[in-house]
Image (spheres, helix red, strand yellow):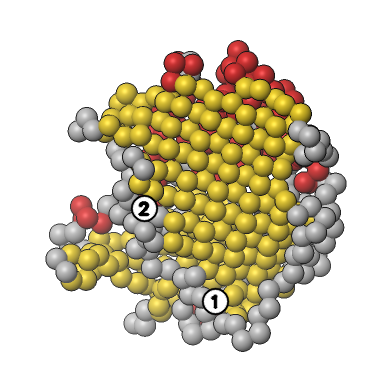
């Protein structure tokens, strides 16, 4: 897992949420202990990359509207930097009550991935020629990080005075504080307004049956509270933050949005990372070309189904064509077609070509780049089934080199069946 600005994008779903968390949330959390806590965060990230042999990281982000849950994402990672092995389990609970989970394991030899869609483990053996990077990448060392840090420092400004930093009896420091509505400067409210609109738009796109409120005006930060604990070794072992924003939707109705963030670092030196026991499990061995051979060249499709008036209705079709397959490359195209009369309900139809290149996807997870109907660049993934079917994941958010999360719409059917002319 990655944390900091890049991981906030991954965990909080949108760039807008990331910008908001790295400003409004930071403003409240850091107060007079800002420089001390920032130093602790930098030291912790450095140790997680190189220094700590093994550890466990937990992260939870949730959003509520007037007390009702809109979404919640949890991530549980076990990392062994010596063995270069990681286990990651992530679960997303959607506003309609549904939940989706996936699991991944990666070491120097094997890659294992499983999602609950087909209840199957995809196992790939990593060739010795592929070099593995660190199990955790320090976000403070990434390109652009110093510039982001300067921006956050400038926005925090005099807000450093609102939080106390105290020595803990067992060693280390405890940071806590809060900001009320009157203490939040205009610049933070401006960033919050932009960030929350971006997050709402993104979630609405991800979930076609989303309950996200369409907040348009009078958006401002109502309250921010936070705590952080530094242990005697100078490592950030926990961080919590709650942000309450308020705003009005297009009908003038008031909404209080509660954004909660929790981070924990634990089991340092005692975390055990092991490949899952696949005895009796539904396992598919995936070669380094994603399990593809020339027999998979052809057309595949599935139906776009919507429930209407108590019945299932076909409103369109998805088509996936595999154009060519070589030893290290798969090329193809994907397009969606709305059934006449259902264009409005279908929405924007995606259409793109793609190329999966093994040399650019050394982690064995079969990612490819594509551009969706909105002109946004996204990640996709393909799996070939022994039954002659293909499994397609779209809108994948890469958390790091070891784990990722699919953001495909709830009604997206990942299974594509061969079309026989």
Foreground mark, 1 or 2, reads 2
Determine which residue is flagged by label 2. Answer: 95
The answer to whether one can see residue 43 in this image is no
Q: CA distance from mark 1 to mark 2?
A: 26 Å
The picture places residue 202, in percent across and down from the top left corner, at 40, 43
> Does 193 sit above or below residue 291?
above
Residue for point 68% across, 62% down: 87
Q: Earlier in the sequence, mark 1 or mark 2?
A: 2
In the image, farthest residue toward the top: 158
Q: In this orientation, which residue lies closer to the viewer: 338 or 221?
A: 221
| In this view, 202 is above or below 82 | above
Q: In this rendering, would 127 be left or right of 31?
A: right
Total marks in image: 2
Task: Give the residue at mark 1.
Answer: 120
SS type, badge 2: loop
Check disc 1 and report its element: helix, strand or loop: strand
């Amino acid at each position: 897992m990655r944390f900091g600005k890049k991981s906030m994008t991954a965990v909080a779903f949108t760039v807008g949420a990331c910008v908001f968390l790295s400003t409004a949330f930071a403003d409240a959390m850091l107060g007079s202990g800002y420089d001390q806590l920032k130093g602790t965060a930098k030291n912790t990230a450095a140790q997680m990359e190189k220094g700590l042999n093994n550890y466990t990281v937990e992260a939870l982000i949730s959003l509520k509207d007037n007390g009702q849950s809109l979404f919640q994402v949890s991530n549980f990672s076990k990392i062994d930097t010596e063995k270069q092995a990681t286990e990651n389990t992530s679960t997303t609970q959607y506003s309609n009550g549904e939940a989706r989970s996936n699991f991944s394991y990666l070491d120097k030899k094997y890659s294992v991935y499983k999602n609950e869609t087909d209840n199957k483990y995809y196992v790939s053996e990593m060739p010795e020629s592929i070099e593995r990077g660190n199990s955790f990448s320090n976000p403070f060392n990434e390109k652009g990080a110093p510039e982001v840090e300067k921006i956050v420092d400038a926005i925090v400004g005099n807000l450093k005075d609102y939080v106390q930093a105290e020595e803990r009896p067992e060693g280390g420091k405890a940071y806590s504080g809060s900001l009320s509505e009157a203490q939040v400067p205009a610049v933070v409210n401006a960033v919050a307004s932009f960030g929350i609109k971006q997050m709402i738009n993104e979630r609405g796109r991800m979930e076609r049956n989303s309950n996200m409120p369409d907040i348009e005006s009078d958006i401002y930060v109502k309250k921010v509270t936070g705590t952080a604990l530094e242990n005697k070794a100078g490592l950030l072992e926990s961080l919590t933050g709650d942000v309450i924003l308020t705003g009005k939707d297009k009908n003038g109705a008031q909404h209080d949005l509660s954004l909660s963030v929790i981070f924990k670092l634990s089991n340092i030196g005692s975390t055990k990372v092991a490949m899952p026991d696949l005895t009796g499990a539904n396992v598919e061995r995936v070669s380094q070309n994603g399990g593809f051979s020339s027999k998979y060249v052809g057309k595949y499709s599935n139906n776009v189904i919507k429930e209407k008036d108590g019945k299932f209705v076909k409103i369109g079709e998805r088509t996936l064509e595999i154009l060519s397959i070589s030893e290290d490359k798969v090329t193809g195209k994907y397009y969606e077609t709305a059934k006449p009369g259902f264009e409005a309900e279908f929405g924007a139809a995606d259409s793109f070509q793609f190329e999966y290149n093994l040399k650019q996807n050394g982690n064995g997870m079969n990612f490819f780049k594509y551009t969706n109907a909105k002109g946004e660049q996204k990640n996709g993934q393909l799996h070939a089934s022994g039954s002659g079917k293909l499994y397609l994941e779209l809108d994948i958010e890469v958390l790091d080199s070891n784990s990722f999360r699919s953001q495909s719409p709830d009604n997206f059917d990942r299974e594509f069946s061969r079309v026989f002319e």
